[in-house]
Image (cartoon, grey):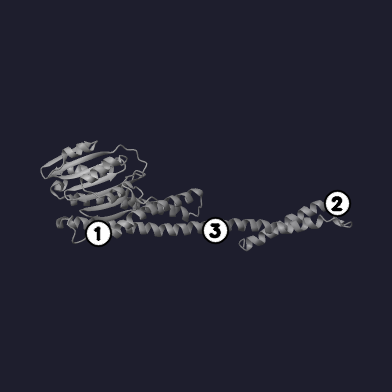
Amino acid sequence: MKNNLLSERLTYNGDNCTHTHVHLLNYSSDHFSETICNDFEEIMSHTPTENKLWIRVHGLKDTEYIRNICTYFKINFLMMQDILNVDHPSKIEKNGDFNFVVTRIFHEDTETSVRLIQGENVVLTFTEGEASFFDDAVKALQENVLKIRTRSSDYLFSVLFNELVSNYVSLAIETGDQLDDLETELLAATTSYNIRMQLQMLRKRYMEIKRTVVPLKDQYSKILHPDSELINETNRPFFNDVNDHLLNAVQLVEGCRETLSSLMDLYISNSDMRMNYIMKRLTVVSTIFIPLTFLVGVWGMNFKFMPELDWKYGYLMAWGVMIAAGVVSYLILRSRKWQ
């Protein structure tokens, strides 16, 4: 891994080729406008302003465009690197005059890197592609739902954070439901290859959710710090509500862990039971054939004097004895419940 402290170069390490552009939302209690900015000069033409701003950056491929935006809003170089490093683990930090959230969202069977930055009168969001999962917040600003335009930028930050947490809650619930369905199949004593693949898939999803949610829960107190100047006291209850949702997400994830662990044990137990059943059947078949093998071995010996070989009905008698021996062995095993 290259030492990022020894280079001023910004590198996007993702594979999303979405053209970098900005959806700029400018709003106040009596004003709202939105503009698509394809270059930095267009952003400059709409700022500075006394209104509040939401800078939605879609696509991270154009690193110079990202650098110009961050430099303009006085976002430091280390934060720029974290924005472009899509493999960075989830975290929350208070960095200078900004609250900074590094996370990801699971949307329409895809996993997308998301960055939230909140400063004074500005919120910036960075996503690898088109971020439709924030459309509800855009609509709320357009329609001034709950007078959102009159509130400070930290309220919008809490709304966007809550959108992310709601995504984690929904995914954890969906994963839990799938685990419950899988438990029903396993209790039916089936051990198909499909069930094993589902277990592996759900375990992978659980690990992805856990790696995303748990660090956010552990570090959320950095946002709620009493001395934080970025959080308006009137909006603190909304951040507390987001914290409650985050704790709920963690509890759901832990529930998935316990269920997944029990299902893995149940799957292994079912596999062992099935193997034992197969071995039992093979043992029964072998046991039935033991006396038959003995009789065939005796009559197959090449002694000169074996009177049975000269009997007229010796062949039929041999078959009769072997069939009788097999039936008797079967009945004995059956009477002992095949044990």
Tag 2: Cα neighbours inside 10 Å, few (<14), some, or many (≥20)? Answer: few
Q: Is residue 218 above or below residue 313?
A: below
51 lies left or right of 219: left
Return the mark for residue 222.
1
What is the distance, in whole Å, between disc 1 and disc 3 at their CAs? 49 Å
Name the residue tied to disc 2. 312
What is the distance, in whole Å, between disc 3 and disc 2 at their CAs? 51 Å
Q: Secondary structure at mark 3?
A: helix
Q: State yes or no: discs 3 and 2 in contact (Cβ < 8 Å).
A: no
Nearest to the eye among marks 1 and 2: give it. Answer: 1
Q: Quadrant of the C terminus?
A: bottom right
- Residue at the image point whose x is 20% and y is 36% from the top: 42
Q: Secondary structure at mark 2?
A: loop
264 lies left or right of 294: left
Q: Is residue 249 above or below residue 41?
A: below
Coordinates of residue 127 in the picture (x, y in percent): 29, 44
- Residue at the image point whose x is 65% and y is 58% from the top: 284
Name the residue tied to disc 3. 272
75 or 290, which lies in front?
Answer: 75
Nearest to the eye among marks 1 and 3: give it. Answer: 1
Which kind of residue does numbered mark 1 sit on? Lys
The answer to whether residue 164 of the structure is visible from this angle is no
Which kind of residue does numbered mark 3 sit on? Asp
The answer to whether residue 242 of the structure is visible from this angle is yes
Which kind of residue does numbered mark 2 sit on? Lys
160 or 185, which lies in front?
Answer: 160
Query: Which image quarter: residue 241?
Result: bottom left
* Residue with the most extreme left position: 30
Q: Secondary structure at mark 1?
A: helix
Coordinates of residue 176 in the picture (x, y in percent): 37, 54
